[in-house]
Image (cartoon, grey):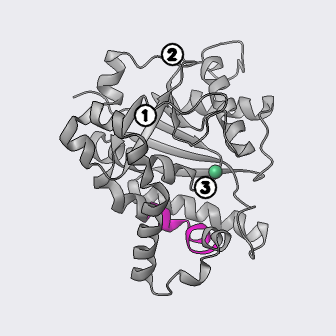
Amino acid sequence: MSVPPRILLIGAHPDDAEYHAGGLLTRYRKELDATVKLISMTDGAAGHHERSSEELRELRQEESANAGKVIGAEYLNWNLPDAHLEPSIENRDRVIREMRSFRPDLVLTHRPCDYHPDHRAVGQLTQDASYLVTVPKVLPEVPPLFNDPVILYMADLFTRPSPFRPDLVLDVDGQVDSIIDMLACHRTQVFEWLPYEEGVLDQVPDEEDAKLDWLRQWFIDQVGERANRFRDALVATYGEERGKAVTLCEAYEISEYASRLDDEKRATLWPF
Ligand SMILES: [Zn+2]
């Protein structure tokens, strides 16, 4: 039995992980008993129309921790200011320290091209840190890693300077309950701010079970199209019959700037 892998997700906001990688993280925990850690670099304190930033900062820490508990993972908010994240040396050093102490085999993050400046910053910081974690003279007080981790970018819709490339696709039809349970922990978002932003706040039911059903439909409406977008890759991965039948999938692009996903690593990090 091989040693379970260590998976680190570095996102910009509390709840980014769930939309793009909730199925994969669930599968890592349940099928591989992987150690999974999620980080939101910002505090998410900009994400509301009514609640104060102070209140939101606290609430969103709790929401993240609860979402992590759904799959048995640690989920931390670093509490850097939402919508003001910079790809600074200070922030890069923090990412390097985190990688050196957690020692991930695989890191999931945003691509450095994205509509949101925080996502871009996180992608840049993570990508830059992934090489520097091996350089002893960078932050010499923290022992370097001998190998840099594999980095996978989570799917997005953007095309410039290059469109997202689905190197790896994953059937997550069996993980919908887990994804919804995780998302539902981010109550200030999925039941308040996001429906408000979309002008559908009056459609969110009051009763708890009905709320979850509503969220499930909302999520499927949001990301269901992903399976059609990556249909060719799903068919190539799973064969004609299963590939065409997948309704919910996740997709990842392998960063060329970090460790290669060679056959040996693929056997432990992508046995799906
Ligand atoms: Zn985000």
In the image, 199 versus 71, the foreground residue is 199
The location of residue 233, given as percent across then percent down, is: 35, 33
Residue at the spot 78% in from the left edge and 52% down from the top edge: 81
Looking at this view, is 120 or 125 the one in front? 120
Earlier sequence position, callout 2 versus callout 1: 1
Q: Are marks 3 and 2 in contact (CB under 8 Å)?
A: no
The residue under label 3 is which amino acid type? Pro
Image quadrant of residue 244?
A: top left
Answer few, some or many: residues within 10 Å of disc 3's Cα (few below 14, many 20 plus, some between 14 and 19). Answer: many
Q: Which residue bears the numbered disc 1?
A: 6
Q: CA distance from mark 3 to mark 2?
A: 28 Å
**Residue 271 point in image, percent of width and height:** 28, 31
Asked if the residue under mark 1 is in contact with the one under mark 2, i.e. CB atoms within 8 Å, the reply is no
Q: Amino acid at mark 1?
A: Arg
The disc label shown at residue 14, or none: 3
Farthest left residue in view: 241
Magenta part, dominant SS = helix
Query: Is-magenta flag for residue 188?
Result: yes
- Residue 147 numbered tag: 2
Magenta range is: 181-192
Amino acid type indicated by mark 2:
Asn
Identify the element where label 3 is drawn.
loop
Mark 3 or mark 2, earlier in chain: 3
